[in-house]
Amino acid sequence: MANGILKGKKGIIFGALDSNSIAWHVAEMAHAEGAEIILTNAPIALRMGAIDELATKLNTEVIAADATSEEDLSNLLDKSMEKFGGKIDFMLHSIGMSLNVRKKREYTDIKYDWMQKTFDISAISFHKLMQCAYKKDAMTDWGSILALTYIAAQRTFPDYNEMAESKSLLESFARSFGYHWAKKNNVRVNTISQSPTMTTAGTGVKGFQEFFDYSNNMSPLGNASAEACAEYCISLFSDYTRYVTMQNLYHDGGFSNMGMSPDVLNM
Ligand SMILES: NC(=O)c1ccc[n+]([C@@H]2O[C@H](COP(=O)([O-])OP(=O)(O)OC[C@H]3O[C@@H](n4cnc5c(N)ncnc54)[C@H](O)[C@@H]3O)[C@@H](O)[C@H]2O)c1
């Protein structure tokens, strides 16, 4: 199916942990579409995940970066531009982690230092990445910056816990920084609001399987898969979407505009 729509483009992909990761699929597809990519993840994920396997397969390299560290991000951008021999055309922020969810703290019993860490990893890291790239003038004209989000930013999903606020913050950074990037050199910034997906981050949420099934029944097209999400990401990195910016784009099989589906009643 690949037709080379990213031919000649260079990009950085955050967040490929294992073959279930959405970023893993994006990396494979970007490579297949002709892009040159660099993979990155937190140092601990490099030890625990399977990212080296992906790097070998795609004949590329992995540069470690904790996305909360400005120093790591600066190093990543410098090394990437050195390897690319120029600026960056696209970046995918595919990072999410909640300490309170991981440690099974209820929303009504939040530990606030964990919450701040969650915001730092899942949302502020996006601002840090964009600010670092902005100061270095690291993006090519008409480049594309993308992050992944979830509809809990707009609606209440009780078990999503503090990730709901993380995603609201993330989406707000895309709008606010999107203005500055557009004015600077026509770079676009968007978030994709993806269906529930069976990944390490997704399945960490309480009752995920039941929720996945509910969402699948509620969405007239069914849940969008990680592969389909990757296809949408590729379109947003391509030159066919140059005037789409500061948007939160639903990629959810229609879930976000549904009120009630008979399929849910028959579950
Ligand atoms: N899975 C879902 O149901 C779903 C739905 C909508 C949106 N999303 C979003 O998609 C994105 C990717 O998640 P996924 O579902 O592919 O799960 P995943 O667990 O495969 O990916 C999450 C990634 O975040 C990385 N990460 C965590 N802390 C980091 C840090 N400090 N620095 C750098 N990287 C760090 C992890 O190593 C991992 O690679 C996340 O933003 C997630 O919230 C997921």
Image (tube, rainbow, N blue to C red):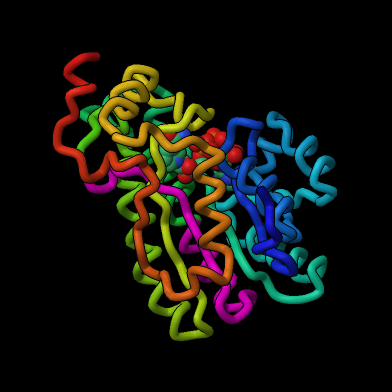
> Is residue 146 covered in magenta?
yes
Residue at horizontal 57 percent and vertical 71 percent from the top: 239
Q: For the C terminus, which image quadrant? A: top left
Does 127 sit above or below residue 254? below
Residue at horizontal 49 percent and vertical 35 percent from the top: 225
Q: Position of residue 189 (x, y in %)?
A: 45, 67
Does 200 sit above or below residue 57? above
Report whether 24 appears left or right of 187: right
Magenta range is 126-155
Residue at horizontal 61 percent and vertical 65 percent from the top: 90
Question: Toward which corner of the image does residue 89 lie, by quadrant?
Answer: bottom right
Report whether 174 appears left or right of 94: left
> Is residue 23 covered in magenta?
no
Q: Position of residue 244 (x, y in %)?
A: 42, 70
Question: Toward which corner of the image does residue 134 lie, by quadrant?
Answer: bottom right
Question: Toward which corner of the image does residue 109 lie, by quadrant?
Answer: top left
